[in-house]
Image: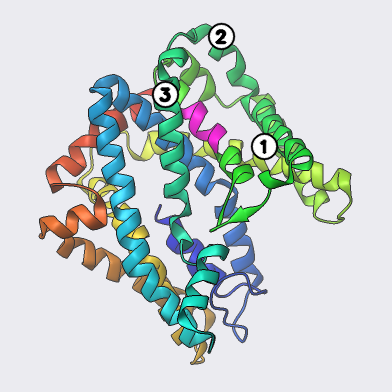
Amino acid sequence: MLLGVVIHSANIFRTHNSWLVWDSANTSATMDWLAALIHSFRMPAFFFVSGFLFSRSMHSNRAKRVMWSRCERILVPLLTVFFFVNTLQLLVMRFITADSSPLPSYFAASFASGAWLSHLWFLVYLFGYITVLRAASGTLDKVPDGLVCKMMPIVAIAAPLLVLGTRIAAKLMPVLASAYAGLSAIEWFDYFWYYFVGFLLATRPLSFTMFNKWTALQTATCIAAVLGLMWSYRTNDMPARIVQAYTTHVVAWCGVLGCVRVFSRVLSSPSNTMRRIADSAYSIYLLHHLIVLVTGYLMTQVQLPLAFEVAIVFLVGTGLPLCAHVMIKRVPALLYFLNGSRSPERQLSGLERPARHFVQRASL
């Protein structure tokens, strides 16, 4: 989740305007590449790991207790940040853009465009995923490990075909591709498959071991997908768009596999530092957006070397939410409303066991 701070900081200094604020006088193609690289795997890897941890929690605790805990962790911070932090963010953007429209019209337009929901969109999708898979968990538990295992060597090739299926469905039913409040059905399905595979692998050790093996086929698939993706951006005809939709998710699956292997090495031994990072990452992400926005806008008003501006935006965008998180942990009400947790101890212990299972599986 902390990579969200990096990508939003980099967006300010890209060679084209792609975010809320843009420092047009201080741009770099390096920021384009950095943002594109992180974007290629960040959310797919997040949803994959989230699906894995949710499944492990479901099988380690009572299902009703897990669902209630997830609702608190997702919906309470979502509503709190949406109504308080993101509302303030809209007012800041109104000042930056010198928007003179009436406030009711401005907020209505911001809600419809997704500007009000902003960086919280993934929590809405996440809540949908846990609801669907909780209902289907009884049926999915009957799927044998051996059957899933047979699909794992080609998951990076086969799973993106499902994305093409949603694109075809969107052509037949355009409503699937339409977006409202920053959400769309087609995007929901795009990310669902990462969550779904993570959910399946959590209770299937043989399949997870097979998924975690980096083979020559996967190497060739990744190289071919990168080359195909680069080619698809050179033209805008229908074949190129199909190749782009497919190869984007092939690259994402390769990124997910790479993240799993990195996690297994970084988290293989207990570390207080990693525990603190995991503890604070949720709060930092929820609170960083407004801070990065304001800091980025201030950077557009001064002239400093690019490296200094990027460092300032990132450090302030990480440091202030981290300080806020430390304060939040000391006030139970704030911890609940801004983190969805009733106590710091419960916040850690709730994920510690499934996370340990994830590392153990990934290390095999």
Q: Hey, which quadrant is residue 50 in on the image?
A: top left
Question: Which residue does the image show at 64% across and 43% down from the upper left?
Answer: 186
Q: Which residues are magenta?
A: 192-198
Q: Residues within 10 Å of mark 3 (few under 14, many from 20)?
A: few
Residue type marked 2: Leu
> Which residue was labeled with disc 3?
135
Q: Position of residue 90 (x, y in %)?
A: 44, 75
Residue type marked 3: Ala
**Numbered mark located on residue 250 in the image:** 1
The image quadrant where one finds the C terminus is top left
Question: Which-is-in-front pick, marks 2 and 3?
Answer: 3
Give the left or right position of residue 331, taking residue 261 as reference.
left
Q: Nearer the N terminus, badge 3 or badge 1?
A: 3
> Which residue was labeled with disc 2?
147
Question: Which residue does the image show at 76% across and 47% down from the upper left?
Answer: 229
Give the left or right position of residue 127, taking residue 24 as reference.
left
Position of 76 relative to 224 (above/below)? below
Q: Position of residue 130 (x, y in %)?
A: 41, 33
Q: Is residue 34 visible?
A: yes
Q: CA distance from mark 2 to mark 3?
A: 21 Å
Question: Which residue does the image show at 55% across and 54% down from the upper left?
Answer: 38
Q: Residues within 10 Å of mark 1 (few under 14, many from 20)?
A: many
Q: Is residue 63 magenta?
A: no
What is the secondary structure assignment of the residue under circle 2? Answer: helix
Q: Nearer the viewer, residue 14 or 91?
A: 91
Give the left or right position of residue 334, taking residue 191 as reference.
left
Q: Nearer the viewer, residue 286 or 309?
A: 286
Q: CA distance from mark 3 to mark 1?
A: 28 Å
